[in-house]
Amino acid sequence: MEVIALNINSLRYCLRQSFVSIFRNFWLVLVTAGIIAVSLSIFGGFLLIAVNMEQIIRNIESNVEISVFLYDDADVKEIQFKLDKIKDVKNYIFIPKEQGLEDFRKSVNNRIPLEGLSGENNPLPDLFRIRATRTEVVPSLAREIQGFPGVELVDYGEKMINILNRITGWLSTVFLVMSTLLALGAMFLIITTIRLSVLSRQEEIRIMKYLGASNSFIRFPFIFEGMVIGWIGTLSATAVIGFVYYRFVSSLQQEALAFFVQPVTNMEILIPIFTGLLVIGTLLGGLGSIVSIHRHLRV
Amino acid sequence: MLKSPLGYGRLQRFDQYHQSGYNYLCDDGDKGVLNLIEFKRVTKTYNNGDVPAVANISLRIGQGEFVFLVGPSGAGKTTLIKLLFREILPSLGQVFFVNRNISTFTEGELLRYRRRIGMVFQDFRLLKQKTVFENVAFALEVLGQSPRKIREKVPIALEKVGLTGKEKAFPSELSGGEAQRVGIARAIAKDPLIILADEPTGNVDRDNSRQIMKLFEKINEGGTTVIIATHAWDLVDRMQKRVIAMNRGHIIRDEQSGGYSTEY
């Protein structure tokens, strides 16, 4: 193991060498940073979509009502009595089938003829709409109510939530595969860039060894160079997705859709995403350099 | 064994004693010169050959000595220098520096050891894109010295080799002799204990070769041990220093105040 640490003068020298090398391989550095930017933009975009989907699902869940459809011969009073005793039930309303038909009539603006469906011909069941105290108790509460005598069906929009979850999962896979492939491409480019740097400084490295340079002194500029490439890529990615997301949020807030879809603007959620991207970009650059110097730099 | 108080961290303490002009006791008890380097039955065989490049060599070099390694091509001179720099390890035997087997040095110790050695090459090995000043400064930058110290030391080293005024020149603008003097300035800038030079006059004309040897002599007078592998028979004859003659990996002559001699 290397035991000689870099002092401040060595560090200064190494940093200078890194920047000289970056300017020497300017175009290659630019392309590599560009690939990192694209891969991290996709990854960051995925993260933003993921947190927004999560928020949408949470909104839907928090507005979830449990609809309890009853058999015609159900004892409504007994069910009411039981519901009163469940502490997870926040409130409920009973909608008799007549009112249900009336509500339906209103919702279709009288466009569908519903004459002759009143009274005994009313095909709709009596209904309870129940709100739970907390979102997470909805599934268990629904299961419990399903067991009550006279209850035909309990529904709380489970399918909708499942569909949203499935879309999020599918998107995650696609985005992760794309980001990983692009990250591997970026890594390959970093390895090549650093290799070129190593080759262009071969003679210098040989002389450094004879002059008594430590291995860390020789390796550090290359690792730092890779990290800087990673930073350039990440900062570009952050700027791009930050700008796009800002425009998206601003335009959405002016649309009627904003009532249903409220994008995440909480900095406590967004800052960790951007910080995470910076860390990933730096690691990508540093790791690519380490792999490259491990393969191409003999010290 | 060495009677001096050189135990743990001896390399650093050795430097202190070296600077204070302390007289060491040799292995054999003689008061005077420190037994700086010792080869004990060293053999080096490279992977691609059955014939050893150096075979069963034993020798001692004291602190402050001036030694010529002479012999035809393939005699083992460069291998000896590489062994001394620990660029390669012996196949058999040991190389000692101040009674420490250099094969057992930790990475940190090896680094400190190498930092006390100034290397001078036949092909100069200067960085083309750097000026004379920057080439010499490079040796100090590598050691992590401060810019202030570098600004102090480089002009002194350049003055010692007679290159004051050439600071801004690039290697391509220098003669062979001047380029080699930059190489020497780079080697001495870090105040080494030992100068190892492999054919330092091989690419230099006769007049410059003589000046370069004078330079080495001057450096040696300051207490630095100088070991030069060379074919420059006329200079070896003229200088009358210790000569270790080698042939086919063996030492065939080790003579104080000797000449080159072509009888191998």
Image (cartoon, rainbow, N blue to C red):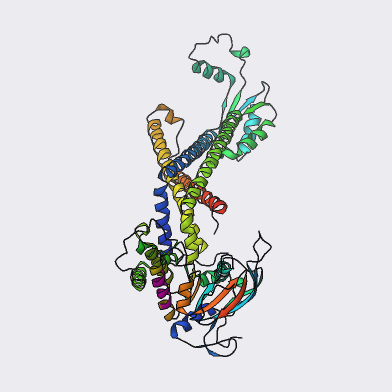
Q: Is residue A268 above or below residue B257?
A: above
Between B241 and A225, the residue placed more toward the observer is B241
Residue B191 % position (x, y): 43, 74
Q: Is residue A197 above or below residue B89?
A: above
The quarter of the picture where the C terminus of chain B appears is bottom right
Residue A52 % position (x, y): 49, 36
Q: What predominant SS class does the magenta segment belong to?
A: helix
Q: Indicate whether residue B260 is drawn in magenta.
A: no
Between B79 and B194, the residue placed more toward the observer is B79
Q: Does residue B145 appear in this view?
A: no
In the rendered view, does A125 fall on the left or right side of B259? Answer: right
In the rendered view, does A187 fall on the left or right side of A149? Answer: left
Total labels: the figure holds 0
Q: Does residue B263 appear in this view?
A: yes
Between A19 and B199, the residue placed more toward the observer is B199
Picture residue at 55% right of the left edge, 42% below the top: A184
Picture residue at 55% right of the left edge, 81% below the top: B255
Q: Is residue A105 above or below residue B60?
A: above
Give the residues drawn in magenta, as a range. B209-217
Picture residue at 53% right of the left edge, 36% below the top: A62
The residue at the far front in this view is: B263
The quarter of the picture where the N terminus of chain B appears is bottom right
Residue A280 % position (x, y): 50, 47
Residue A33 % position (x, y): 45, 43
